[in-house]
Image (cartoon, rainbow, N blue to C red):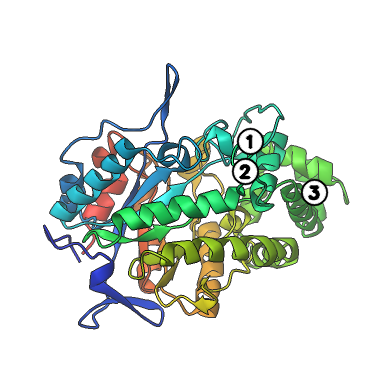
């Protein structure tokens, strides 16, 4: 379904029908979208969060076959001081919603984070970072989830709902209040489809144990010849970690995961601590935020994904969102998935098999949840021509399951990329 100017498929236009999103006439809708975010830039005295996007950007999206935008917003931009909200940033969000409405595009507001905080990458404001550990970037930015004590301690304070020193209010309570304020401001906007509650939530220091278990299980599934090729011996988990951080040996490891049966087995063997985190830590947080939003907005959809580790095919243990103790009737499962060469120079080697294994896991989760799906992050293919093969393979897979999807992501020059051409050519 192409965008129709002035008629976005916002929350008031859509309802759930089991695992489908349908319009008020009961017709299934096809949501094809893109991520749009400015993660902030340092300026004298702080951060600049208002981007210089072209005024006709939403119109250009609509003309290129896009009818959904996942608009990234940042806690640091929304609430720069505890309980103090930035009206200029609210005006920016409102302007994007208005432009989307005019273009016929629906919008998901995505509370984005990478490595928890603006201090480390993007996300939480400084006042919500409760660690004194120094931060050192890793060669591949996302590996800091695994290796940075500063990032891990920050997450641990958040999951403990540790009180903010200046207010005595817990971090999660502040976060829920931020969402309540956003929902009170923007609910009912014709372009607003829903709220993506928190991008890729990650464990704290327990992620080290999860990753170690994953590597140990991977090692146990290798043949003698594969271990020799990787330069590891039985039981040598440290050697597997070293292979993982070496680009050439990492590619050899990923080639082994083209074996879908072993990829599946690896995820199942490694799932117990991940599922426990989602059950015991992540779910109560999601329900707290959902309840806060439902105090002011009963119409917009609530979107939740899985934890960061489940991006790579480890089974997720999420359950439906509960607001005020009841399953929320307007919710969407919002998984993420990238082939494991993402964010590296090897993106042109993206594997259909590995990506299929990851999304097949998410399909199992959807069936267990009985919820509609919008894949809110996938791709990250940049200018690679693999968009015409790997990208097309994934779009076809998503749509065969009736899933909406938002590609990662818009960048200057996007409209000249193979991905833009592939999406525009879809029927």
Q: Taking the image as drawn, is residue 377 in sight?
A: no
| Label number found at residue 227 | 3
Of marks 1 and 3, the one in the foreground? 1
Q: Taking the image as drawn, is residue 93 in sight?
A: yes
**Residue at 52% from the left image edge and 50% from the top image edge:** 175
Vertical placement of 51 versus 373: above or below?
Answer: above
**Residue at 42% from the left image edge and 66% from the top image edge:** 295
Disc 1 and disc 2: Cα gap in Å?
6 Å
Q: Which residue is mark 2?
A: 251
- Viewer-proximal residue, 66 or 261? 66
Disc 1 and disc 3: Cα gap in Å?
16 Å
Does the residue at mark 1 contact the one at mark 2 (Cβ under 8 Å)? yes
Mark sitting earlier along the chain (2/3): 3
Residue reaching furthest to the top: 44
Tell me residue 12's x, y (percent).
25, 70
**Residue at 67% from the left image edge and 60% from the top image edge:** 281
| Label number found at residue 247 | 1
Q: Residues within 10 Å of mark 2 (few under 14, many from 20)?
A: some
Tell me residue 148's x, y (percent).
69, 35
Callout 3: SS: helix
Is 84 situated left or right of 67 in this image?
Answer: right
Q: Quadrant of residue 195?
A: bottom left
Tell me residue 351's x, y (percent).
51, 53
Tell me residue 136's x, y (percent).
66, 27
The quadrant the C terminus occupies is: bottom left
Mark sitting earlier along the chain (1/3): 3
Vertical placement of 47 versus 308: above or below?
Answer: above
Is 67 situated left or right of 248 in this image?
Answer: left
């Amino acid at each position: 379904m192409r965008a129709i100017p002035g008629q976005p498929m916002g929350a008031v236009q859509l309802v759930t029908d089991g695992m489908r999103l349908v319009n008020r006439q009961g017709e299934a809708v096809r949501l094809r979208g893109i991520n749009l975010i400015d993660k902030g830039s340092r300026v004298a005295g702080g951060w600049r969060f208002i981007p210089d996007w072209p005024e006709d950007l939403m119109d250009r999206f609509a003309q290129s076959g896009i009818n959904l935008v996942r608009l990234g917003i940042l806690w640091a931009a929304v609430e720069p001081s505890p309980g103090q909200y930035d009206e200029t940033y609210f005006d920016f969000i409102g302007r994007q919603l208005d432009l989307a409405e005019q273009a016929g595009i629906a919008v998901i507001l995505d509370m984005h984070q990478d490595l928890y905080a603006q201090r480390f990458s993007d996300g939480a404001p400084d006042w919500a970072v409760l660690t004194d550990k120094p931060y050192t970037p890793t060669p591949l930015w996302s590996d800091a989830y695994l290796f940075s004590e500063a990032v891990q301690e920050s997450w641990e304070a958040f999951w403990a709902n540790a009180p903010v020193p200046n207010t005595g209010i817990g971090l999660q309570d502040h976060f829920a209040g931020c969402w309540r304020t956003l929902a009170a401001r923007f609910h009912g906007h014709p372009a607003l489809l829903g709220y993506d509650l928190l991008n890729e939530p990650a464990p704290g220091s327990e992620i080290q144990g999860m990753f170690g278990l994953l590597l140990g299980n991977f090692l146990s599934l290798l043949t003698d010849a594969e271990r020799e090729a990787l330069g590891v011996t039985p039981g040598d988990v440290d050697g597997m970690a070293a292979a993982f951080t070496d680009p050439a040996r990492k590619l050899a490891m990923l080639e082994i995961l083209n074996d879908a049966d072993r990829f599946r087995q690896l995820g199942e063997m490694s799932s117990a601590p991940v599922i426990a985190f989602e059950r015991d830590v992540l779910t109560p947080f999601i329900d707290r935020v959902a309840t806060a939003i439902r105090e002011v907005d009963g119409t917009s959809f609530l979107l939740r994904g899985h934890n960061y580790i489940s991006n790579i095919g480890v089974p997720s243990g999420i359950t439906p969102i509960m607001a005020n103790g009841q399953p929320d009737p307007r919710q969407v499962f919002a998984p993420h998935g990238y082939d494991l060469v993402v964010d590296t120079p090897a993106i042109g080697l993206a594997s259909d098999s590995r990506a299929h294994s990851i999304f097949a896991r998410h399909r199992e989760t959807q069936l267990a949840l009985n919820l509609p799906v919008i894949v809110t992050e996938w791709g990250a293919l940049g200018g690679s021509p693999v968009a015409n093969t790997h990208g097309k393979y994934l779009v076809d897979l998503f749509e065969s399951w009736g899933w909406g999807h938002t590609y990662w992501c818009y960048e200057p020059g996007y409209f000249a990329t193979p991905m833009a051409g592939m999406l525009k050519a879809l029927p």
